[in-house]
Structures are given as C-alpha cells and as structure tokens.
Amino acid sequence: MFIDTNVFLNFYHFADDDLTELDKLIKEIGDGGICLHIPEQVRNELARNRESKLKSATDEFSKHPLPAGVPRHMQTYTQYADYIAAIEQAKKLRGQLISIALADASNQTLQTDVLLRDLFAKSARYAEDDEVFGLALQRAQRGNPPGKAGSVGDQYNWEMLLKMVPDGDLHIVSRDGDYSSLLNKTRPHPSLETEWMEKKGFFTDFRETQP
C-alpha cells in the first residue's frame, strides 16, 4: 500500500476520517498484514506542509462564527439567558482548545503526530535516491503522470515505488486526483496502471478519498 502525503496532512485539518482510522491501520501493518511503502519524500512533504495545514485549520476554526443572534420574539424566554451563556462558554472553550493544540503542535505531541510516528516506524521506508530523483525529473519534463505541472514530488514517489516495491499488487490511497483517471475517480490514471502492469505484472488498486 502507498498513501499519498495529502491524506496524512488531512488529519491536521477537518478530515472525514477520525484518528481511529490511523490506529486501525497501524495494527494492520506487518506480521503478514499490510505492507505500507513510505518514500522519504512523503515524510519530507509532511514535515514541510504540516504547519501550514495546522495554521489553516486553526484560522478556519477560530474565525467560524458562533450563532449568537436570537430573534426578538424568543428573547423573553428564560432559556435565552442560558443560550447566551452557552455561546460565551463555547467561545471560551474554543480559545482554550486552540491554545492547548498550538502548544502540542509546537512540541510535536499532537495525537496525530504520535500516531504518524508509530505508523512510519512500522512501514517500509525508502531513503532519498539521486538516481531515482533524476528519473522523476525526466518524467516531469516529459509531462508524464502523476503530479501537477511545476512539481516533481509525485513523480519522485512513483519512481521510487517502481524501484523499491516488490513485484505484485499496489494499493494507492490519494485525495488530490494526481494518480486517478480523469474519467473515473475510482480508477488509477490509465498510463500509470499500464506502466505498473508492464513493470510489476499486476494491476494497481486505487482509492481516491474525498477532499
């Protein structure tokens, strides 16, 4: 299995999946279970973009308006005062949540940080490789997938997988469309599928998660 960096980064934002999904995956890795392939590029991308993702999530959470307005005809009820007090309490708790989370983020002690470290420790990790990076540059210059124009990260990951993953099936989990077919998001890009079949002998299984 290969999981794209954007999936990991989403656990620092408003992800659909909660952290129990990471915990479940950790328990499935090794001992005849899932083999998770992690090129060093994935870890580097995660480190580079982690704070940006955290800041975006914090800003969005802190600026989201709480529904303090109450229609005039409801303000005569006793529950009105309780409602206003609850809103003020929610604002206070939001501020506390932000402060605590920012402190843990600075110390790399968020539960997401802990789980990802455990996940990577159990994974098959592949160090940087200048020769493979050269192949990735050629792939990018030729306009071959995966990846967007002006970027070489996805190409680097793909070339590393081609070199390091044993012959067999490859399960890809991504969420930004770089690996998927334009016509069917449940399928890999046809040229990537063909390339993997020709070099590894098996189809690529694919999952595109929702943004």
Image (cartoon, grey):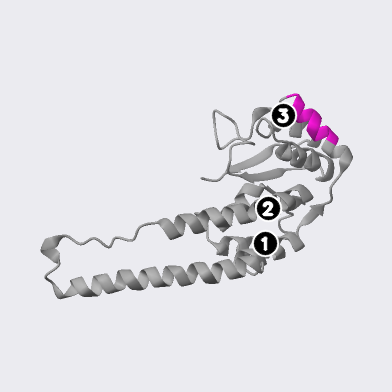
In front of the other: 128 or 84: 84
**Do residues under tags 2 and 1 come within 8 Å of each other at their CB atoms?**
yes
Q: Amino acid at mark 2?
A: Leu
Which is more foreground, mark 3 or mark 2?
Answer: 2
In front of the other: 171 or 138: 138
Residue 39 vs residue 80: left or right?
A: right
Q: Earlier in the sequence, mark 1 or mark 3?
A: 1
Magenta span includes 20: no
Main secondary structure found in the magenta portion: helix
Q: Residue at x 76, y 58 (%)?
A: 123
Q: Is residue 162 visible?
A: yes
Residue closest to the far top: 142
Q: Amino acid at mark 3?
A: Thr
In front of the other: 54 or 169: 54
Q: Quadrant of residue 154?
A: top right
Q: Amino acid at mark 1?
A: Leu
Give the Cα distance between marks 2 and 1: 10 Å
Magenta stretch in the rendered image: 134-142
Q: Which residue is mark 2?
A: 46
- Could you tell me residue 14's position as x and y percent? 50, 55
Other-residue count near label 3 (Cα within 10 Å), few / some / many at <14 / 14–19 / ≥20: some
In this rendering, is residue 113 above or below 130?
below
| Mark drawn on residue 194 | 3
Q: Which residue is mark 1?
A: 116
Q: How many numbered marks are there?
A: 3
Q: Earlier in the sequence, mark 3 or mark 2?
A: 2
